Image (cartoon, rainbow, N blue to C red):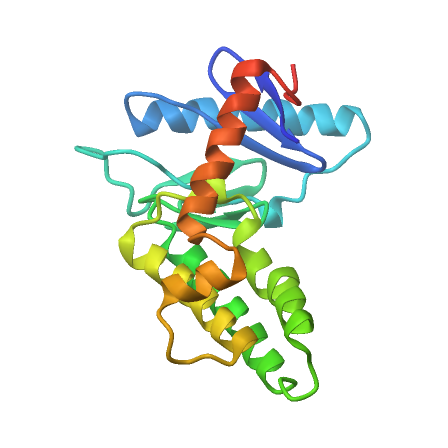
Amino acid sequence: MYSLAQLDFSTLYNCADDNSISCQADNLNEVKTNIEHATDMYINWFHQNRMKANSSKFQSIFLGNVLTDDVTNFSFNVGNANIPLSDNVKLLGVNIDNKLSFNEHITFICRRAAKQLNAMSRLRKVLTQENKMNILNAFSLSNFNYCPVVWHNCGLVCTRKIEKIQEQGLRFVYNDFISPYSELLSRSGKCLLFVGRIRTIAMEAYKIVKKIGTAL
């Protein structure tokens, strides 16, 4: 779970040995100044505590509307490292793009889930229906259970791609390539993955309101 430290000009998010810094400002020059200042402070703290920041893993991304600032050649200078802005960064296993469309992330997890389904289909003659369902849940569909609160609003096209994977998986389990998706869902006792994510968001919101399992 993330822990958070607030400075006057930036916020530090920490998860195990992963650290991220954010800053909100009216222009990029202010962002640059604040981020570089904060990063230098944290790196110095590492050195004082006999730790080392790996600058080769540094990455940066800008989220927001740029009206007058040119971000084409924009970069941060931290120590001896030059960190250019990226269109897409990977943070704790989630690909985040500067439009927050999550297209690349959804494409990646759908491709991985599809490969797993293809691998399972080769064993369809030796697996029972129960085996197939267990494997589907544990391997393919589990790809969509990681941080869904973050990427839920990924757009209609991505939402359909995700549902298509579950549909293909259920057709593999039941060896049924004719029945509509709704019937397969009813037979399996499952719901749309979209609905499942809404339920997850509702539960997380409830935990936040009730202060259940949240870091203080």
Q: Residue furthest top?
A: 8
Q: Residue 97, how many percent across, how many down?
A: 38, 48
Q: Is residue 74 left or right of residue 186?
A: left
Res 210 quadrant in image: top right
Res 15 quadrant in image: top right
Q: Viewer-proximal residue, 141 or 66?
A: 141
Up/down of 54 relative to 118, above or below: above
Visible in this render: residue 37?
yes
Q: Residue sitting at 82 percent across and 31 percent down? A: 50
Q: Residue furthest right?
A: 50
Visible in this render: residue 84?
no
Q: Residue sitting at 57 percent across and 24 percent down? A: 12
- In what quadrant of the picture does the N terminus appear? top right
Q: Residue 121, how many percent across, how many down?
A: 58, 83
Q: Is residue 8 left or right of residue 129?
A: left
Q: Residue 26, how many percent across, how many down?
A: 28, 21
Q: Residue sitting at 51 percent across and 45 percent down? A: 59
Q: Viewer-proximal residue, 79 or 111?
A: 111
Q: Residue furthest left?
A: 67
